[in-house]
Amino acid sequence: MNVLVIGGTGTTGSLLAKLLPHARVGTRKPVRDGQVRFDWDVPATFGTALDGVDRVYLIPPVGVADPAPVVESFLVRARLVRRVVLLSSSAVPESATGMGALPALVRTMPEWAVLRPSWFMQNFTGDHAVAAGVRDGEIVTATGDGRIGFVDAADIAAVAARALTDPLPHNTDHLITGPEALSYADAAAIITELTGRPVAHRSVSTEELTGRLATWLPPEFAVILAKLDEDIRGGAEDRVTSTVLDVTGRPPRSFRDFFRGFLS
Ligand SMILES: NC(=O)c1ccc[n+]([C@@H]2O[C@H](COP(=O)([O-])OP(=O)(O)OC[C@H]3O[C@@H](n4cnc5c(N)ncnc54)[C@H](OP(=O)(O)O)[C@@H]3O)[C@@H](O)[C@H]2O)c1
């Protein structure tokens, strides 16, 4: 089997590439053996990236309001691909356009799986706005006391690896969470305890968050992201699933273990 990992340098893709060392890593700037140029903005890169490939981990173009047309044109080119595993999100319902239109496209492939992870634990580390809040001592959201089944991207990658390589195709959606639903205040308390440095959570109104996000994001994305926080405040992400255990045979990592690992 020959796997192409789109977004293979990113949060889930890089972890998946470690689990599948023979996979081809798609990146806009290939520098190493095993990497191939792949750019959603340059369809001419699709053919070479797909050459000899029969399975694809598909991360849609990031920050594109309606990725369906370009993803569809990619899948049309992927005639020899048997199996596609799409990274979607627990917060994206099926729809006629936008991100929500992608699962229907992927289901046209002979074999498929749609991953719907909840929020990544990695948002608390690295470049994400929540991570900046951790560093500043105050995480600002519009989530109130709403809880989220934060999941380690390594667990998402483990589910993806099984969905790509299991002899039988999964042909289903996988709603993926960590082992517990936590509010941002809960997560901040765990970080405070582990680091000894106070980190608090401050919940603001949806409108205030929209304004804050719009200082560094396109206004339409600021609205979308703030609305997701509002949904969390209403309980939309307050759930846990057994997907990681069911698919990989081992339980998902807790937030405490994840952050302890990050610190070590
Ligand atoms: N963060 C969360 O809590 C969360 C929760 C659920 C779902 N998700 C989903 O996860 C996905 C990505 O998450 P992320 O923020 O962690 O991103 P990411 O996977 O870390 O990074 C984006 C990846 O996409 C590649 N990329 C960027 N622009 C590209 C282009 N034009 N063509 C081809 N590849 C391109 C980058 O590779 P190069 O720079 O090497 O080209 C990089 O590997 C999103 O679809 C999001 O909806 C996120």
Image (tube, rainbow, N blue to C red):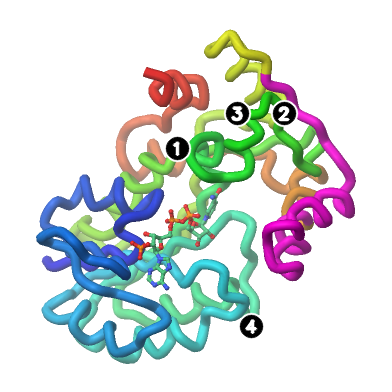
- For the residues marked 1 and 4, what is the alpha-carbon distance in whole angstroms? 30 Å
On whether ligand 1 comes within 8 Å of the CB at mark 4, the answer is: no
Q: Pointer 3: what residue?
A: 135
Three-letter amino acid code at the position of disc 3: Arg
Q: Is residue 210 magenta?
A: yes
Residue 66 sits inside the magenta stretch: no
Callout 4 crowding tier (Cα within 10 Å): few <14, some 14–19, many ≥20: few
User: Upstream in the sequence, badge 1 or badge 2?
Assistant: 2
> What separation in Å lies between label 1 and label 3 (alpha carbons)?
19 Å
Q: Residue at x 29, y 74 (%)?
A: 38
Q: CA distance from mark 2 to mark 3?
A: 8 Å
Element under disc 3: helix
Q: Residues within 10 Å of mark 2 (few under 14, many from 20)?
A: some
Q: Is residue 214 above or below residue 206?
A: below
In this rendering, the label closer to the viewer, 1 or 3: 3
Position of 142 compared to 32: left or right?
right
Query: Where's the N terminus, which quadrant?
Result: bottom left
Label 3 environment density (alpha carbons within 10 Å; few <14, some 14–19, many ≥20): some
SS at badge 4: loop
Q: CA distance from mark 4 to mark 3?
A: 39 Å
The residue closer to the viewer here, 8 or 80, is 8
Q: Is mark 2 within 8 Å of ligand 1?
A: no
Query: Which of label 1 and label 4 is nearer to you?
Result: 1
Q: Which residues are magenta?
A: 199-226
Is residue 129 depicted above or below 220 in this figure? above
Q: Residue at x 64, y 57 (%)?
A: 91
